[in-house]
Amino acid sequence: MSVIAEIIDTLENKVEKLFIKMKNLEQNNQELEKELIKNASQIQIQLEEIEALKKQYETLKIANSLLGSDDNKRDTKLKINSLIREIDYCIAQLSD
């Protein structure tokens, strides 16, 4: 009987250790999920900042071209032509 009792005690100890390990892993998993959410939020904020900076860069390129810089003149002319076409379209819509 003592052999069976020892086996049962050993099994109980192993099961208890497994439960402890499982709880630690669950806690670690929760911490990692929180960190993942935090990092995803940071990435989203940085993507928004990148988009804002791209728009600002394009605006600065156009402003720089309008001030007489030879760089990006073609882009500026295309943008102005596009704006003129949009204005003409709006005027045509209003005329109808």
Image: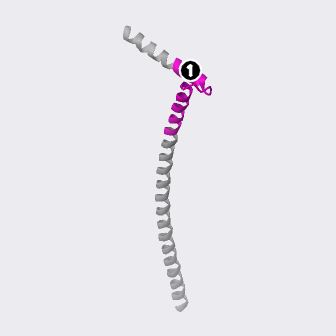
Farthest front residue? 68
Above or below for 73 versus 35: above
- At 47% from the left and 67% from the top, the residue drawn is 27
Rendered location of residue 29, percent (x, y): 49, 63
Main secondary structure found in the magenta portion: helix
Give the secondary structure at mark 1.
helix
Rendered location of residue 51, percent (x, y): 51, 38
Rendered location of residue 80, percent (x, y): 52, 20
Residue nearest the viewer, comparing 39 with 29: 39
Q: Is 72 part of what is drawn in magenta?
A: yes
Residue nearest the viewer, comparing 6 with 42: 42
Above or below for 75 versus 30: above
Q: To which quarter of the image does residue 93 belong?
A: top left
Which residue position is annotated with label 1? 78
Residue nearest the viewer, comparing 9 with 45: 45
Q: Which residues are magenta?
A: 52-81
Q: Amino acid at mark 1?
A: Leu
- At 46% from the left and 17% from the top, the residue drawn is 86
